[in-house]
Image (cartoon, grey):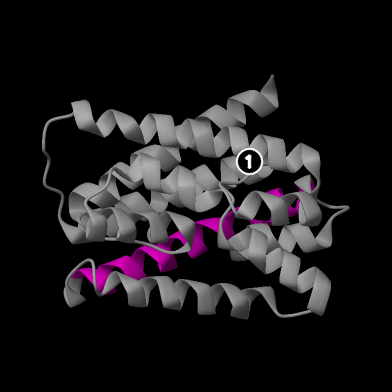
Amino acid sequence: MKRGIKLILGCLLISLSILIFKHAHITTGGTTGLALNLSYILSVPFDYVFFMVNLPFYILSIRGMGWNFTVATVFSVGIVSCFTGIERFLPELVISPWGGALFGGCLMGIGLAALFSGRSSIAGTGVVTVYLQKRFGWNPGRLNLVFDSVIIGIGTFAVSLTDTLFSALSIVVISLILSFFKNRIANTYSSEPAVVNLRVNN
């Protein structure tokens, strides 16, 4: 029951943060940012893109974190896709890039922390990171920095250069929030150090 509440709360906060990013017309890191970029470039609803982009990562998730974590992750991705789909029924809102990066980043960070403490995630590049860390011993922090840099780079084709900088700011905010919850997340995965690194560096 407690885990279910964490998952629903995390999905709700993440969905709100994504809607804020969209209405501020900025992007962010991870597959969330990749899906935002593609939705801007292709003019396709975010929820469709987000669900499809995450499909390949489930295979690595099974190999890297097992079935229990992967099933919870598929559930979380599905819920976020459904929650963000309500945007089509909402009035058009304009949010400043500053507000989008700061407020959206805070909600995303708290939402991710809730999911992580509930032994779930929204898949994405973090899954690749932990897989490469476990297989080759690569530094997870550097890997995530590379992945996020590439995604922000792709964002320059989807949003303005100024908005790209605000997108980078959102990543910093998310990282700070996750660092704040680092010990709580680590306690949840105290017997799985590789997974802890995924959580904190996602």
Q: Residue at x 12, y 40 (%)?
A: 93
In the image, is 50 to the left or to the right of 10?
A: left
Q: Is residue 17 above or below residue 152?
A: above
**170, above or below 142, in the image:** above
Q: Position of residue 148 (x, y in %)?
A: 47, 72
Does the image show residue 100? yes
Q: Residue at x 37, y 40 (%)?
A: 47
| SS label for mark 1 | helix
Q: Does the magenta segment cover residue 145?
A: no
Task: State the residue in front, 124 or 101.
Answer: 124
What are the residue bounds of the magenta stretch?
Answer: 163-187
**Of 68 and 178, the residue lying toward us:** 68
In the image, 138 versus 4, the foreground residue is: 138
| Residue 119 visible in image | no
Which of 102/13 is in front? 13
| Left or right, 188 with reference to 36 | right
